[in-house]
Image: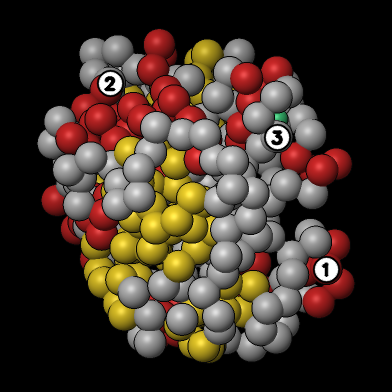
Amino acid sequence: MKALRYVEVGKPPVVVDIPIPTPGPGQVLLKVTAAGVCHSDDYVMSLPEEAYRDQHYPLPLTLGHEGAGVVHELGEGVDTALQVGDAVAVYGPWGCGYCHNCSTGRENYCTNADALGIRPPGLGNQGSMAEYMIVDDPRHLVPLGDLDPVQNVSLTDAGLTPYHAIKRSLPKLGAGTYAVVIGSGGLGHVGIQILKALSGATVIVLDVNEDKLELAKHVGADVTLISDASAAGKIREITGGLGANAVFDFVGADPTIATAIAVAGLDSDVTIVGIGGGTASFGFGSIAYDAAVRVPYWGSRSELIEVLDLARAGKVDVEVQTYSLDDGPKAYEDLAASTIRGRAVIVP
Ligand code: NAD
Ligand code: ZN
Ligand code: ZN
C-alpha cells in the first residue's frame, strides 16, 4: 500500500510502498477514506534529531493524526458492535482506557500513556496517511454514520481541539460578551463556527493573512482584524474598554500570546491552543483581575461525538482542500506557504 512517511529528520515526507499491516489481537484494521493535515505535523517535522528522539517518535513515521475509514478487519478477540464495512472516525489521543481520566472519556489526559508508551496515530504510532491503518482498540473509533469522511475527518482534531477549548469557557460567553480568535487556519475557522453555534459572543478574529480573514468572515466572524501590534488597542475599543471575555490563541507565538493577555478582560479565559513556542508573561497589574490562562490538549471521546453531532446538525462545516496520497508532500508545502483555505485533506 502507499503511505506518506517522514523518513529522515529535517527532510520532507515521501510517498512509499509498504505492506498492508495485519491487525494484532484487540486491534482494528481500517481502510482509510480521509486523513487531515495538521500544523502540528509540521512542528514534529521541524524538531531537531535529539528533540525528535526525546519524544519517542519512530522513523519512519506514517503521518496523520486526523483519520477516517471503513472497518476492514477485526483482530483476534475484538469485542465491538462495529461491523466490517462500518464508516468511522478515529479518536486520536489514545490513552490506557482504565485510569480515572480515561474512564471519563478524557483519554487526552491519560495519566498512564507516557509510562506505557501509548501514542496517538501519526504522533508516535503509524498514522492515517496510508491506504490502511491500525487502530489499537475499537474504543478509539466513533461511528461516522452518514457524515462524509472527507468533509468531516478534520473534526477529529481541527474540530475537537477548539470544541474542547471553547466548551470550558461557555459559561463566560453569554449574550453581550466578546470572544477573540487568533489564527483563522484549520483549527481557527472551525473554532469560529463553534463559538457562533454555542455562544452569544461577538466573535473577533485576528490573522496576518487577508485570505484567512476572508475565510473567517465567510464562516461567521463578526469582526476581522489584521494581527499586529495595533490589534489589542482596536479590540479594547470594540469592547468598550472592557476587553474580551475569552481569547483563543490558535497560534501560540510570543506576539499573539502578548495580544491575548493584553485584550483579556476581567474574569476572562485566555486559552493558548497553538504550539508556536511562545510563553505568557503576566503578573499583578499586567493582566486583568481574575483572568485565567489555560493550555489545553486535544479533547475527550464524548466531545468528539458532540462535534460530529454539530456537523450533522449543519452548524459546523470544514473548508476542505483535497490532495491524493501522491500529492501529500505538496499539501505540507502549501501548509508551510499558508495557502490552504481551511484544512488540507488527503484522500487515498
Ligand atoms: P494552520 O496553519 O492551519 O493555521 C494557523 C493560522 O494562524 C493561519 O491562518 C495563519 O495565517 C495564522 N497566523 C500565523 N501567525 C499569526 C499571527 N501572528 N497572528 C494571527 N494569526 C497568525 O494551523 P492549524 O493546523 O490550525 O494549527 C494551529 C496551531 O494549533 C498549531 O500551532 C498547531 O500545532 C496547534 N495545535 C494544537 C493542538 C492542541 O491540542 N493544543 C491541537 C492541534 C493543533
Ligand atoms: Zn493536530
Ligand atoms: Zn488512561
Q: Is mark 3 within 8 Å of ligand 3?
A: yes
Q: Nearer the viewer, mark 3 or mark 1?
A: 3
> CB under 8 Å between callouts 3 and 1?
no
Spatial separation of the CA atoms under disc 3 and disc 1:
22 Å
Q: Which mark is residue 199?
A: 2
Question: Residue at horizontal 75%, vertical 40%?
Answer: 113
User: What coloring was used for the rendering?
Assistant: secondary structure
Front in this rendered view, residue 191 or 73: 73
Quadrant of the image containing the C terminus: bottom left
Q: Amino acid at mark 2?
A: Ser
Q: Which mark is residue 96?
A: 3
Q: Closer to the N terminus: mark 3 or mark 1?
A: 1
Q: Residue 215: image x %, image y %?
A: 21, 56
Q: Closer to the N terminus: mark 3 or mark 2?
A: 3
Q: Is residue 220 left or right of residue 188?
A: left
Q: Is residue 237 visible?
A: no
Mark 2 neighbour density, 10 Å: few (under 14) some (14–19) many (20 or more): many
User: 273 above or below 14?
Assistant: above
Q: Which residue is mark 1?
A: 53
Question: Residue at horizontal 34%, vertical 27%?
Answer: 306
Q: Nearer the viewer, mark 3 or mark 2?
A: 3
